[in-house]
Amino acid sequence: MGFYDLPKDQRDILVDEINKEIAGDIKTGKKTFLMLFFSDEDTYIRKTAYLAIGKIYTAYKKLQKSIITVLETLLNENDPKIRQTVVNAAGEIGKYDFDIVQHFFDTGLFDEHHSVRNAVIGSMKKMGEKNPAPVIEWSKKFLHHPDKEIRREICHGIELRGRTHPQEVLPLLHELQYDKTKRVRWTLVHVIGQISYKKGCLETVMNDVLKWENKELIADAIEEIIDVHYRYRNFSYYTQDQAKALIKQITANC
């Protein structure tokens, strides 16, 4: 039976049990339950497990070194679900202490399994909300990496921070404007659209992107921004028509 097949009260009991078992493993230097929950087929069990790591790390300073040590061990496991959960657990820690877990992302970004690499992207997003400065600084190292998938993943990973603070990620996106790989270019255009639709963001994005040198990319980005204001019409600050008018006005003034 899956996590969400259980009634709410039973889910709460299960979460408490997972938290206690994981804390017990860390305190005793074992990894029996860590292995069990980190490798579970149910993604929500694994999520409960990596959230437990984050809670224990912040609540018990004496256990922090032990947590990092056991995560380092688990990152070498053959099961990609375990490695994926390790990276997600590192992301929980990285929301408050990025330097101590940076090496997990240095490794996970190059993992052979896509789920582990995707966990890096997900971790970048949640860390970027709480602890953006070191995450953005770390991301800069990979903007021109020879592997196109690394460039794409980094571009995708900084998206969530850009939705509320586009000025912080636009300099990194600018670096990718001449990337010749289709998937990287598509992700770049997608991210520009995603960081444009909340209050105050469209003005910031347009005033920056219109100064870029790649005119073809600018045109594609504007098209995506306008489309986003329709697709996200229930969430965007401006209507699509208002966005079009504002873009026209900003363009005329540049």
Image: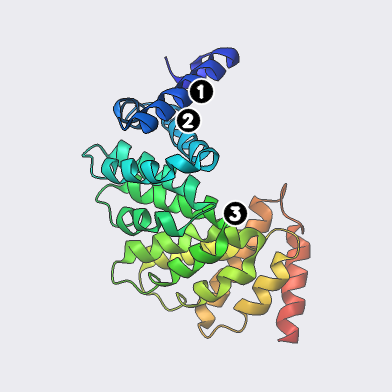
> Would residue 127 be found to the left or right of residue 114 on screen?
right
Query: In terms of depth relative to the viewer, which is nearer, 118 or 220?
Result: 118
Gap between marks 2 and 3 measured at Cα: 20 Å
Indicate the position of residue 43 as horizontal and vertical percent values.
42, 31
Residue at the left extreme? 78
**Badge 2, how many Cα within 10 Å: few under 14, some, many 20+?**
many
Q: Find disc 1 in the rendering and name its residue.
A: 15
Q: Is residue 42 above or below residue 116?
A: above
Residue at the front extreme? 62
Query: Is the C terminus in the top left, top right, bottom left or bottom right quadrant?
Result: bottom right
Q: Are marks 3 and 1 in contact (CB under 8 Å)?
A: no
Indicate the position of residue 224 as horizontal and vertical percent values.
58, 63
Q: Earlier in the sequence, mark 2 or mark 3?
A: 2
- The quadrant holding residue 239 is bottom right
Query: In terms of depth relative to the viewer, which is nearer, 29 or 11?
Result: 29
Q: Are marks 1 and 2 in contact (CB under 8 Å)?
A: yes
Q: Find disc 3 in the rendering and name its residue.
A: 130
What's under tag 1, amino acid-wise?
A: Val
Query: Is the N terminus in the top left, top right, bottom left or bottom right quadrant?
Result: top left
What's under tag 2, amino acid-wise?
A: Thr
Q: Is residue 98 above or below residue 137?
A: above
**Helix, strand or loop for disc 3:** helix
Checking the image for residue 48, the label placed there is: 2
Q: Is residue 154 above or below residue 89?
A: below
